[in-house]
């Protein structure tokens, strides 16, 4: 178990780890599956239209998939189209130059800020990676900033259910969550 403020070194990673990297305004989460590969949820690609919902537009700017051409490793993985919303990529493309962190499971909330830990115990690594592999094939449904995002994907792989917290683990999300559910 590491300190949430400490970067994790690549050499410390184990298959089945829930990892994340901080981006400018959010954190991107995934499951490390070994061999410098990460399975992560980037949302479904949708055709753009003037009638798209706010969750559709938010997934476009939060998606970890960008116009940046894939590296040779990710290009060989042939997953860049991610028609089902789940992608496998190399660790470098997942991090996009950011620092590497590990999300902790089975720990007390003391000493860990919201969004960096889960009190639930993780499933064994082989179950976690099997869930990630299955979701890579089947997808993870429609993206929602508040209830079905990359953090929910990684948490589901680890404990077999959604986290039950607002996506990206920030108390500041609560007002946004309330506004997004106003009829």
Image (tube, helix red, strand yellow):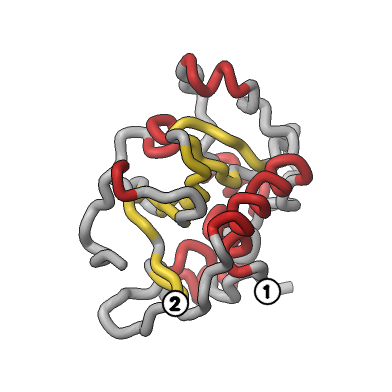
Tell me if residue 99 comes above or below residue 161 in the rendering.
above
- Write the residue at 58% across / 35% down: 88
Query: Is residue 91 shown left or right of residue 33?
Result: left
Quarter location, residue 85: top right
Query: Is residue 85 shown left or right of residue 98?
Result: right
The front one of 152 and 172 is: 152
- Write the residue at 48% across / 14% down: 72
- Write the residue at 31% across / 34% down: 97
Check the picture and name the quadrant holding the N terminus. Answer: bottom left
The front one of 62 and 87 is: 87
- Residue with the mark numbered 1: 182
Residue 114 appears at what percent x and percent y? Answer: 38, 74
Quarter location, residue 5: bottom left
Tell me if residue 85 comes above or below residue 6 in the rendering.
above
Q: Is residue 113 visible?
A: yes
Q: Is residue 172 visible?
A: no
Residue 180 appears at what percent x and percent y? Answer: 63, 67
Residue 41 appears at what percent x and percent y? Answer: 60, 46
At mark 2, the secondary structure is loop
Mark drawn on residue 106: 2
Q: Earlier in the sequence, mark 2 or mark 1?
A: 2
């Amino acid at each position: 178990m590491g300190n949430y403020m400490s970067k994790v070194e690549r050499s410390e990673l184990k298959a089945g780890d829930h990892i994340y990297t901080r981006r400018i305004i959010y954190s991107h989460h995934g499951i490390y599956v070994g061999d410098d590969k990460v399975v992560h949820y980037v949302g479904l690609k949708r055709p753009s239209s003037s009638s798209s919902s706010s969750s559709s537009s938010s997934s476009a700017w939060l998606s970890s998939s960008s116009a940046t051409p894939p590296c040779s490793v990710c290009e060989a993985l042939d997953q860049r189209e991610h028609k089902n919303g789940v992608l496998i990529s190399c660790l470098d493309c997942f991090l996009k130059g950011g620092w590497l962190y590990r999300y902790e499971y089975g720990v007390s909330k003391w000493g860990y800020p919201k969004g960096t830990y889960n009190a639930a115990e993780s499933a064994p690594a082989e179950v976690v990676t099997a869930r990630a592999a299955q979701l890579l094939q089947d997808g993870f449904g429609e993206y929602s900033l508040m209830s079905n995002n990359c953090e929910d994907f990684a948490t589901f792989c680890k404990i077999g259910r959604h986290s039950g917290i607002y996506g990206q683990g920030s108390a500041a999300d609560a007002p946004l969550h309330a506004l997004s559910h106003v009829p």
